[in-house]
Amino acid sequence: MSFLEFLIQLDQQITLWINSLNSPATSVVWPFLSDTRIWFPAYGMIAIVAFWKLGWKKGLVVVLSLVLCIILTDKLSVLVKHGAERLRPFYDSNMLANGLKWPYGADGRHFGFFSSHASNTFGFALASSLGFSLNDKRHNWKPYTVGIFIWATVVSLSRVMMAAHYFGDVLVGSLFGMAIGFFCAMLGRLVIVKAKL
């Protein structure tokens, strides 16, 4: 067995284990958490906090860096999906035969590597956390950081619960998202410093 085959098998086993934690009681929660539209009010509130705590100039730069982060993570993850062409778990008959829980139905999108949800949420989490903490030393942003990363983790794992992604899709997506989030936060910080905002 090659190392790549070992990683694929390990990924499948971890995915099946996480997915097995699903239950009829929780199965209604995961689609709710995965629906990106329900988080728009939260994004709006975070933007309001940015303007309120940082002032309109710094706040605008941080909000624009968050918008850039979401655009980059979303569009690049879609490009990788079509390049890698890795089928989602619910299209894998072997995964279904081994107990994959999939009560939701296909969504029409065949490819899952890597997770856009994980990329977007972890990118947003890191970019916003750094955007606040680097540009406002008056307030303690640790509670926000903990909360936003818990949110990103739960949303990302909901995709495994829904059998839409392997755990590896989520792991790679989260790491990619944080790399983009770091880049966008540093870019925003550079603009703020250079413009002396």
Image: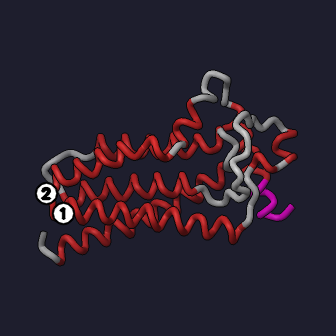
Task: Please tell me whether mark 2 sits on a helix, a strand or a loop.
Answer: loop
- Relative to 65, say whether 112 is above or below: above
Residue 7 painted magenta: yes
Q: Residues within 10 Å of mark 2 (few under 14, many from 20)?
A: few
Q: Point out which mark residue 28 bears.
A: none
Instruction: Give the quadrant of the C terminus.
Output: bottom left
Q: Quadrant of residue 14?
A: top right
Q: Residue visible at 22% across and 53% down?
A: 50
| Residue located beneath label 1 in the image | 58
Q: Disc 2 residue type?
A: Gly
How many tags in the picture?
2
Q: Nearer the viewer, residue 87 or 177?
A: 87
Q: In this image, 95 relative to 14: left or right?
A: right
Q: Residue visible at 45% across and 41% down?
A: 38
Task: Please tell me whether mark 1 sits on a helix, a strand or a loop.
Answer: helix
Q: In this image, 119 relative to 28: left or right?
A: left
Q: Residue visible at 71% across and 32% down?
A: 20
Residue 27 painted magenta: no
In contact (CB < 8 Å): disc 1 and disc 2: yes
Q: In this image, 127 relative to 21: left or right?
A: left
| Residue located beneath label 2 in the image | 55
Q: Which residues are magenta?
A: 1-8
Q: Main secondary structure of the magenta part?
A: helix
Residue 169 pos. (x, y %) = 64, 55
Q: Quadrant of residue 192?
A: bottom left
- Relative to 192, say whether 111 is above or below: above
Instruction: Give the quadrant of the N terminus.
Output: bottom right
Q: Disc 1 residue type?
A: Lys
